[in-house]
Image (tube, helix red, strand yellow):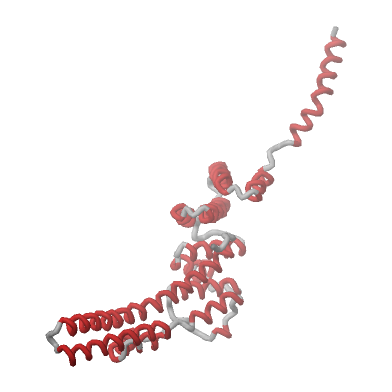
Amino acid sequence: MTRKCTGLRISWLLLLLPFISMAQSARFDTLGFYNHLVSNNLLREQLAFNNLWLHAHKGNSTLADSTNLNNAILYYKLNVHDSVITNLERISPRHNFTEHSERIYLSMLLLQAKLREADTALNGGKNILKSGTYYNDARLSITILRHEKIMGDSSSIGLSEKMLQIRNNYEKIPHHSAFLATAYSTVIPGLGKWYLGYRHEAVTAFIPSIFLAGQCVESYIKAGPGSGRFIVSASLFGLFYGGNILGTLILAHKQKHDYLKQMDYEILDFHNAVVGKPVR
């Protein structure tokens, strides 16, 4: 009886052995699972996994900084900008990122208009005067986003090809005087727009103004200053003439604003590429 029981146990063990072996080899592959989430672009699932990972490894500041940076990137790709800022603020000033992560961190700060924090990360604390092409690009990005004057010779600074092109365009920013443009349009309708570089708008402002001025003079000569014809023509000329002056003033301010806005877009597109978010 005892031999039969022993034999039965051995038989069961032999039957279960393959299943035990399979269970041991089928341990949960954490890295493989996360790579699966990444390869399938499952952003929200990555966020859930990261939060569980943070909870399971409380007290590990290095891991927390890396995970918070990863979360910030994921929220940015999901266009949840409040959460992006929240996760960036959770990163310790004394983080120990790799160079690759440091670049992404700086680009994320710039994309969220955290210029002071990015400047501190570049030039303060343990990261004093980081050198290299990307860091030069980041410093130039801060200057352009602040709309400040670029100091130094562009040929003496190591920049990427893209940022060098952006810098050259930034240095060509229109510097037309709004006062002069308005004064020119006051003297000759359309001349202020010509000065600003809007030749087509200048012609379309000049020709109707001359036509209305001629009608006004003709009405004054033929019908007199008290006639309805003169009052109507003078009113139309005054409205068009005053509108042209006001339009020139607005156009002068808009020209510089639009140019700077375009520069901002180019900077953000550059850092979008660093983070890995497609440019729209």
Q: Position of residue 270 (x, y in %)?
A: 56, 68
| Front position in the image: 184 or 211 | 211
Quadrant housing residue 65 = bottom right
In this rendering, is residue 133 above or below 277? below
Residue 112 visible within the image: yes
Q: Residue at x 39, y 82 (%)?
A: 201
Query: On the rendered structure, is 150 left or right of 181?
Result: right
| Front position in the image: 6 or 176 | 176
| Front position in the image: 57 or 113 | 113
Query: On the rendered structure, is 215 left or right of 144?
Result: left
Residue 61 visible within the image: no
Q: Position of residue 157 (x, y in %)?
A: 57, 81
In this rendering, is residue 164 above or below 215? above
Q: Residue at x 58, y 85 (%)?
A: 155
Which quarter of the rendering shows the N terminus?
top right
Query: On the rendered structure, is 56 left or right of 248?
Result: right
Query: On the rendered structure, is 104 left or right of 15?
Result: left
Q: Position of residue 95 (x, y in %)?
A: 54, 59
In this rendering, is residue 140 above or below 223? above
Q: Position of residue 228 (x, y in %)?
A: 15, 81
Which quarter of the rendering shows the C terminus?
bottom right
